[in-house]
């Protein structure tokens, strides 16, 4: 009799459809929260995954006296290395921009992303959507960099924007408000699951790996884990969802 695929098998199958992945984000931990399971499954399949952080997240603290930028940036690089090791991602690069200073029209940054696309030749690019998930200006800037670079390179790869489902927002919106997760008064719009290009809720090994990778990023996750039990935290980070970007029109000869 045929054996039904396990959740882990199903995730590896979903990841396989992404081919070579270029995963581009603003700060270390963005990639793990939004695509950690997919990246881990892709690597287990033997796919190439190149993960890129625009900054080291050196200003990502509410206590700069304890965590001055040089110290925090150095530690967040170590934390990211530990997280990537757990996920199996061996190619993780920093673009070395300053945290909190990113602008969407930065031509140097756009050129760097173009060069990455040329080098890696990805089948799929993962990054932020227009809302940056939390309306963080750095997240939104990276969205614009990647979109501009992708359009200039002809839109050959499939570009996927991180999204949140309407079901997920209904379930967790109150907690997100309590934690002051959003950077402005704007709020994301949930996407129906059937309108997404990629959607999964991690279970089993891959959820455990994602949570372990996030726990390795102690400077960013310890505060939340101090007020949440681990099972609740796992449920809240289990979803990974991406919407398909619209391809640019073909160039006129």
Image (cartoon, rainbow, N blue to C red):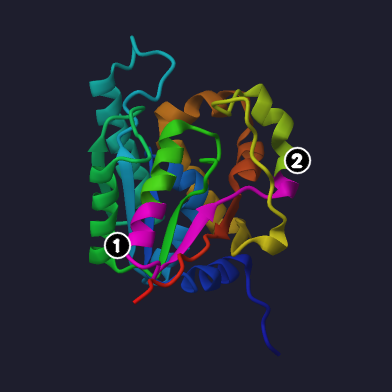
Does 141 appear above or below 166?
Answer: above
Residue 94 covered by magenta stretch: no
Quarter containing the N terminus: bottom right
Classify 10 Å Cα crowding around label 1: few (below 14), some (14-19), many (20 and above). Answer: many
Residue closer to the observer: 154 or 161: 154
Does 57 appear above or below 145?
Answer: above
Does 75 appear above or below 16?
Answer: above
Q: Which mark is residue 69?
A: none
| Residue 106 spot, x, y in % from top left | 29, 40
Q: Label 2, label 1: how many angstroms apart (C-alpha)?
A: 36 Å
Q: Which mark is residue 171?
A: 2
Residue closer to the observer: 28 or 117: 117
Quick check: can you spot residue 58?
yes
Q: Secondary structure at mark 2?
A: helix
* 125 relative position to 106: left or right: right
* Magenta stretch in the rendered image: 147-168
Quick check: can you spot residue 29?
no
* 123 relative position to 175: left or right: left
Residue position marked by numbered label 1 in the rendering:
117
> For the residues carrying marks 2 and 1, which lies nearer the camera in this image?
1
Q: Residue at x 30, y 69 (%)?
A: 121
Q: Residue furthest front?
A: 253
Q: Residue at x 65, y 34 (%)?
A: 187
Q: Residue at x 73, y 48 (%)?
A: 166
Occupied quadrant, residue 79: top left
Residue closer to the observer: 244 or 65: 244
| Residue 133 spot, x, y in % from top left | 55, 40
Classify 10 Å Cα crowding around label 2: few (below 14), some (14-19), many (20 and above). Answer: few
């Amino acid at each position: 009799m045929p054996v039904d695929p396990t959740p882990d098998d199903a995730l590896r199958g979903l990841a396989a459809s992404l081919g070579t992945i270029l995963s581009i984000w603003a700060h270390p931990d963005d990639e793990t929260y939004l695509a950690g399971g997919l990246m881990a499954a892709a690597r287990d399949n033997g796919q190439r995954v190149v993960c890129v952080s625009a900054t080291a997240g050196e200003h990502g603290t509410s206590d700069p006296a304890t965590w001055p930028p040089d110290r925090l940036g150095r530690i967040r690089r170590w934390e990211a290395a530990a997280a990537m090791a757990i996920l199996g991602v061996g190619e993780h690069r920093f673009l070395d921009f300053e945290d909190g200073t990113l602008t969407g029209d930065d031509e140097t940054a756009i050129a760097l992303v173009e060069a990455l696309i040329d080098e890696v030749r990805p089948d799929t690019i993962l990054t932020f959507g227009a809302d940056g998930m939390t309306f963080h200006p750095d997240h939104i800037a990276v969205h614009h960099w990647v979109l501009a670079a992708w359009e200039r390179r002809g839109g050959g790869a499939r570009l996927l924007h991180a999204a949140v489902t309407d079901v997920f927002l209904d379930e967790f919106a109150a907690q997100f408000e309590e934690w002051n997760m959003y950077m402005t008064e704007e709020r994301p719009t949930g996407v129906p699951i059937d309108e997404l290009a990629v959607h999964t809720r991690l279970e089993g090994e891959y959820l455990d790996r994602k949570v372990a990778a996030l726990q390795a990023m102690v400077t960013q996750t310890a505060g939340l884990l101090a007020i949440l039990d681990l099972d609740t935290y796992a449920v809240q980070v289990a979803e990974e969802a991406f919407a398909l970007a619209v391809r640019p029109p073909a160039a006129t000869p």
